[in-house]
Image (spheres, rainbow, N blue to C red):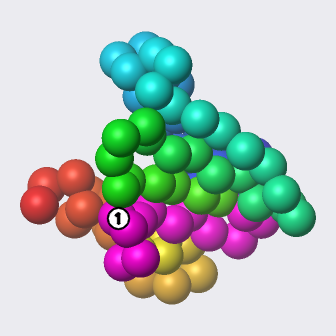
Amino acid sequence: MKLHEKKFNEILELLKSKLGSKISVSEEHGTTSLCIEDSHYWLSTDAYELTVGFSLDHQHFSEEYEGLKRELNRLLSS
């Protein structure tokens, strides 16, 4: 399992533990997505990257571009 997939799963488990049934997960064309009910926040992961979004605005995170660990730290400290 790649780092971005592991981080997606960790975030998913955390959100499920805090928000329960407000989290919906779907899989389509090799992409796993999660949405938070009554919210514009969403996350998705595929074979290459983690994407974090709010409505139409989103940010891609990948080890190949800028370093996933550094970008996640930047995102979480904002």
- Front position in the image: 70 or 56: 56
- Front position in the image: 48 or 51: 51
Q: Residue at x 46, y 54 (%)?
A: 42
Q: Name the residue type under label 1.
A: Phe
Residue 75 in the figure: left or right of residue 20: left
Disc 1: CA contacts within 10 A as few (<14), some (14-19) or many (>=20): few
Residue 70 place in picture, x, y as percent: 32, 66
- Front position in the image: 13 or 3: 13
Q: Residue at x 51, y 31 (%)?
A: 23
- Residue 3 in sight here: no
The span shown in magenta is 46-57
Q: Name the element at disc 1.
A: strand
In the image as oriented, which residue stretches furthest toward the left? 78
In the image as oriented, which residue stretches furthest toward the bottom? 65
Residue 31 in the figure: left or right of residue 49: right
The answer to whether 22 is drawn above or below residue 2 in the figure is: above
- Residue 25 in sight here: yes
Residue 2 place in picture, x, y as percent: 69, 54
Residue 73 place in picture, x, y as percent: 26, 57
Quadrant of the image containing the C terminus: bottom left
Quadrant in the picture for residue 49: bottom right
Quadrant in the picture for residue 9: top right
Q: Which residue is under mark 1?
A: 54
The answer to whether 64 is drawn above or below residue 42 in the figure is: below
The answer to whether 18 is drawn above or below residue 56 in the figure is: above
Q: Residue at x 34, y 47 (%)?
A: 39
Q: Residue at x 46, y 16 (%)?
A: 20
Q: Inspect the magenta stretch and tell me whether residue 37 lies in it.
A: no
Task: Please count the marks in the image.
Answer: 1
